[in-house]
Amino acid sequence: MNMDERRIGVYVCHCGTNISATVDIDAVTSYARSLDSVVVARDYRFMCSDPGQDLIKQDIKELGLNRVVVASCSPQMHEPTFRRVCEDAGLNRYLFQMANIREHCSWVTEDGKEATDKAKALINAAVRRVFYQEALEITEIPVNPNTLVVGGGIAGIQAALEIANSGNKVYLVEREPSIGGHMIQLDKTFPTLDCSACILTPKMSDVGSHPDIELMTYSEVEEVSGYVGNFKVRVRKKARYVDEEKCTSCGVCQEKCPWKAPSEFDAGIGERKAIYIPFPQAVPNIPVIDTETCVYFKTGKCRACEKFCEAEAIDFEQKDQYMELEVGNIIVATGYDVFDPSPITQYGYGRYDNVLTGIEFERMCNATGPTGGNIVLKDGSAPESIAIIHCVGSRDKHYHAYCSRVCCMYALKFAHLITEKTDAEVYQMYIDMRCFGKAYEEFYERITEEGVKFIRGKVSEVTDQAISEEEKGKLILVVEDTLLGSMVRVPADMVILSTAIEARSDAEQVVRLFSLSRSADGFFLERHPKLDPVATMTDGIQVVGCCQGPKDIPDTVAQASAGAARVLAMISKGKVELEGITAVVDEEQCSGCKTCIPLCPFNAISFDEEKKVSGINEALCKGCGTCVAACPSAAITQRHFTTEQIMAELEGVLV
Amino acid sequence: MATLAPFKEAVDAVEEAGGEAFKLCYQCGLCTGICPWNTVRSFLVRRMMHEAQLGLIDFEGEDVWLCATCRACVERCPREVPIIDIMRALRRTVVGLGVGPIPDSLRLTMKNISALGNPLGEEREKRADWAQGLDVKSFTKDTELLYFPCCIPAYDPRGKKIARAMAGILKAAGVDFGILGAEENCCGESVRKSGDETLFEGLAQSNISIFDEKGVKKIVTSSPHCYNTFKNEYPELGANFEVIHYTQYLAELIRDGRLKFTKEINKRVTYHDPCYLGRHNGIYDEPREILESIPGLELVEMPNSRENSLCCGGGGGRIWMETKKGERFSDIRIEQAIGLGAEFLVTACPYCIINFEDSVLTADKSEIIQAKDISELVEQAI
Ligand SMILES: Cc1cc2nc3c(=O)[nH]c(=O)nc-3n(C[C@H](O)[C@H](O)[C@H](O)COP(=O)(O)OP(=O)(O)OC[C@H]3O[C@@H](n4cnc5c(N)ncnc54)[C@H](O)[C@@H]3O)c2cc1C
Ligand code: SF4
Ligand code: SF4
Ligand code: SF4
Ligand code: SF4
C-alpha cells in the first residue's frame, strides 16, 4: 500500500434519534461515500458504544484506513473516545477528525433539509482537513513524586496528610506562623457542634510530626516555573527571629515582652505580644517576632525576650531564607478572607461597640478567647438580646452576588451557643434559610425548638436613635418583617453580622504565580464546575477548599481529598503525556524580533542568543496559538492547525 | 382563599412600560425599610414588587402614587432592581389603560402643563416676568449660555427669588447668558414620573427643537430635576447639548476666580442633598464647596446626608399631589436642621425649597430657621 495514499473512513452517528430525527442519515452517508479519498462510509445508532467503536477498529485493520472522521456530537465529550479507538487500532490519534452534526445541526434547527445540508458541509470540511493531518508524537515525561501544598488551613492539612500517608513527600507552605487557617479560630462547628480545635489539633500535630511532610510555616511561594510532573518552586522562609532548633516552646518570651498588638488569631478583639505564639495549640509551637510592634526593631533597645530565653533561641540577626523545591504536582489551598462590613455604614460596624462580625463572635465564644468564652458586651455586662443579620456582603450585587453558603448555618450555631451560655433573646434576620447539607435541616429544626426568633427580612439599618423607652440604650434594628408585611424595630444589645466569605485579597498574585484563572466571583476557576471541580486549566495544579469557592468544612475536606486523589493517581502512573499540538518556530523564517516571547502565557518561548532566533519548549507549550498569530514573519506554525489544514477545512464548508 | 388570577393585560402593560425588572426582586424587604414613607406611614415597596410579579397590582389604591422617586431604595437594593422604573411603569399603566384613578391635583397639573407648558396654570407669556428690571437678555445664536430656570422659579413668588439670584450672580461674574422665556416649556421630569409618557415626549420634543433652532450649546439649570431630564433622558430623543447644574457652574466660577465674595454670612447652616442632584447624579461635593467658600458661614451636616439624604417628598410628581399633615418628610428634615442649631436649611432645588418653606410656615418656625437656595446665599455674599 502507498503510504501517501489517503484512505479515509467516515462514520455517521444517529445518536439514538438525537441526530437522525432531523438529519437525513442515508443521504449524508452516501454523500460522504462520494467524497475524494473516502474508502468507506457507514452509519450506526450509537458510534460511541462498544459495537460502534469496533466498526471503526475493524475497518482500520481490514480496509487499511489511515484517516478517520466521525460525524456525531461535540468533541468535548467524545473526541478522546474516538482518538483512543484509533490508537487501539494502531492509528495515531491526530489522524482523527470529528464533525459535530448534533449541536451544530440537528439541535439548532427543526428544518430537516437545512440540517442535512449543513451536516454534509461539515463532513466535507472534516474529510478535507483530515486529508492534511499528520501523525504527531506524544511524548511522555516522568513525574516527580513530591508535592507542594500551598496553604495550611483544613483544606491544605487534609490534602497533605492524604498524600503523605501514601509514603510520598509533601512540602506544606503556610504563610502564617502556624497552620490551622480559619477553622482553628472557630469555637464549635455546625451541625454536630464538635469543638473545632478538638477535631483539628490532632490533624495539625500529625502534620507537624509526619516523616513525609516538610512543614514550612511563615513562608511564601515566590516563584514557580516548569510544568506538570516537573515544577520548580522557590519558597521564602521569613525570618522568625527565633531559632526553631533551639526553642523549647516554653513561652517565657511572650510572657515577658512588654509590647502588645491586636491578635490576628482573636480577629482583633484580643491582644498578643510583639513576640508571640499565635495560640496555645499552634503547629509549630514556636514564637515569631512581629517587627512592626517590636520596639527593638524600631529603637534598637529592649531585647527583653532574649534575656529571659534560657534556650538562647532568640536571634535578632536571623535573615529570610530561600529554598528551591522540585515537585511534580501542586495543590493550592489558600482559603478565603472574611468580608469587611465597614462599607455597609448602615450596620454601624466600627461605629457601635457591640456590632461584631461572625469570626469575632467565634473568638468571643471560645474558652481560649479574650473573654474566656463569656458572651459579654464591651462594658462587660451580659446582653439581654442579640440579633444576627444574615447575608452581610453576600447575595448583594453591591458586594458579592453569590451566597456564601455557610453564614445561615453558622448563624444558627451562634443562636445555639448564645442560648446555651446566656439568657439573651436571639433574633435571626434572614432572607432565605439555606440549610442544605447532611443533617443541616435537622440542626435548623433543633435551633428553632430552642426558641430562637426568626424575622424574614433584610435589615435596612442599625441605629442607636431610640424612639421609645424600651429602645433606650439599645441598638435598634430596622427591618421589614416580610412575613408580617410590616416594619418592625428590634432592640438588641449586641448585633452579629453574618459576614460573607470572599476571595483572598491577594488572589490575583496567586493567579499569576500559578497560572490560574478566576471566575466572576473572584475565586479560583476549576476546569469544569461539575465534572472536574478540583483540576485547573494548568495541568498538575489543583485548587481545593474555599479558595475555589465558599464552602463548609465537610465540602472542603471532601474536595481536599479529591485533590489528593488526583495527585496520587499522577504519582502512581509515574509519567505524563504531553499533547503533540505545539507550536514550532521555523528558524529560517524567524527574524529574531522577539515579539512572541512576552506574549506566550505559558512562558514557553526563549531566545537562542547564538542563532538569534526564538525557540519553543514543547513541554511548556499548550498550543494556544497566540504566538502563531502574532509572529510578523509568519515563522511559527502550530501543529495540527497548519494553514493548509485550516484552509482545506474552510473550503470544505464553503463548497 | 382567593384564586390566583393574574391581571394578565396589566402585567403585560407594566412590562411593556419598562417595568419588567420586578422579576429580579427576591423579596428581602430592604427597600421597604429604606423608603422614607415608612417613617411616617406604612408603604410596602417590597410587596408591590411581589404583586407585580404575580399580576395582582392594586391599581386603584393610593400606593401606586406614593413613591417620591428619591432613589434611596434603588441605591441599596441587593438585586439592583430599578424600583423607580417599576413605579413609573405602574403609573404609566394607570394613565395609559385607565385601570385606576389619577389623583385630582395631579390630573389638574398635567392639564396645565399640557395646555400652558407649566404646571401652575400661569400664562405662557409671563414666563419671563421674573426677570423684570434685571436687564436679562433673550437668548440668541451668539449667546454662550442658556439659563433654564424651571417652572417654579419662573412663576412661583418664592421661587422667583432663586431665578433672580441666579441672574444676579451670572451678571456679576460677567457670564454671557440669555433666557428663552415664553418659548420654553416645562422639562417634563415630573410628567414622566407621573406616568404620562405621551405628554413628556411632546414637551421634550418641543424643547429640543427650540434649543436646536436657537443654537443652544450649553444650559445651566436651577433645578436638579430639569438637569436630570436634560442630561439623562433628552439624549434618547435626539438632544445634543451640554447640561450643567448651577452648583457645578458656580463652583467652577469660584475656582477660576471669576466669582468673588465680599460679604460675610455669619450663620450656621446645614445642607440638604436634593435626591436628583445627589443620589440620581452623584453631585455631592460642589454644593458643599460653594458653601464652604462663603466667608463667615459655618456648615454642619445632618445625620442623613449625601447618599443617605432624606427626601423632601417632592420628587416623582409628589410635589403636585396632596401629602397629609404628619406624613411630610420635609417636616422631619426641618426638625433635624433645627436640632443642629442651623439657622438656614440650605438646598439646591426649587421643589425642596417649596416643601421646606411650607414646613417652616406650618410649624411656625420661621423665627428659628429659614429655607434657602445656595444661589440666594451666593448672591447675598458677592
Ligand atoms: C464565622 C465563620 C464560622 C464558620 N463556622 C463553620 C462551621 O461551624 N462548620 C463548618 O463546616 N464550616 C464553618 N465555616 C467555614 C470554614 O471556615 C471553612 O469551610 C474552612 O475554614 C475552609 O478551609 P480552607 O482551608 O479552605 O481555608 P482557610 O481556613 O482560609 O485556610 C487557608 C490557609 O492558607 C493560608 N494561605 C493563604 N494564602 C496563602 C499563600 N499565598 N501562601 C501560603 N499560605 C497561604 C492561610 O494563612 C490559611 O492558613 C465558618 C466560616 C466562618 C467565616
Ligand atoms: S449562607 Fe445564608 S446567610 Fe450566607 S449568604 Fe447564603 S443565604 Fe445568606
Ligand atoms: S502556542 Fe501558545 S503556548 Fe505555545 S509557544 Fe505559542 S504562545 Fe506559547
Ligand atoms: S430591596 Fe430589591 S430585592 Fe429587596 S425587596 Fe426591594 S426590590 Fe426586592
Ligand atoms: S424611590 Fe424613594 S420613595 Fe420611592 S419607593 Fe424608593 S425609597 Fe420609597
Image (cartoon, rainbow, N blue to C red):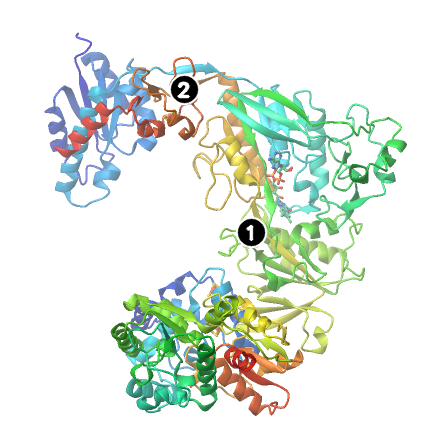
> Which badge, 2 or 1, comes first in the chain's sequence?
1
Instruction: Identify the mark at residue A513; answer none if there is no mark.
Output: none
Quarter of the image for the N terminus of chain A: give it. top left
| Above or below for B270 versus A634 | below
Q: Position of residue B271 (x, y in %)?
A: 57, 75
Element under disc 1: loop
Reading the image, the residue beneath label 1 is: A435
Task: Identify which residue is drawn at 34% across, 25% down.
Answer: A80
Quarter of the image for the C terminus of chain A: give it. top left
Instruction: Identify the mark at residue A578; answer none if there is no mark.
Output: 2
Q: Quadrant of residue A312 in the image?
A: top right
Q: Nearer the viewer, residue A217 or B375?
A: B375
- The answer, for residue B1, to whether it is visible in the render is no
Question: What's under tag 1, amino acid-wise?
Answer: Cys
Q: Nearer the viewer, residue B303 or A458?
A: B303
| Above or below for B267 versus A643 | below
Q: Are marks 2 and 1 on the same chain?
A: yes
Task: Identify which residue is drawn at 21% across, 40% down.
Answer: A106
- The answer, for residue A62, to whether it is visible in the render is yes
Q: Nearer the viewer, residue A155 or B239?
A: B239
Q: CA distance from mark 2 to mark 1?
A: 44 Å
Element under disc 2: strand
Q: Residues within 10 Å of mark 2 (few under 14, many from 20)?
A: some
Q: Residues within 10 Å of mark 1 (few under 14, many from 20)?
A: some
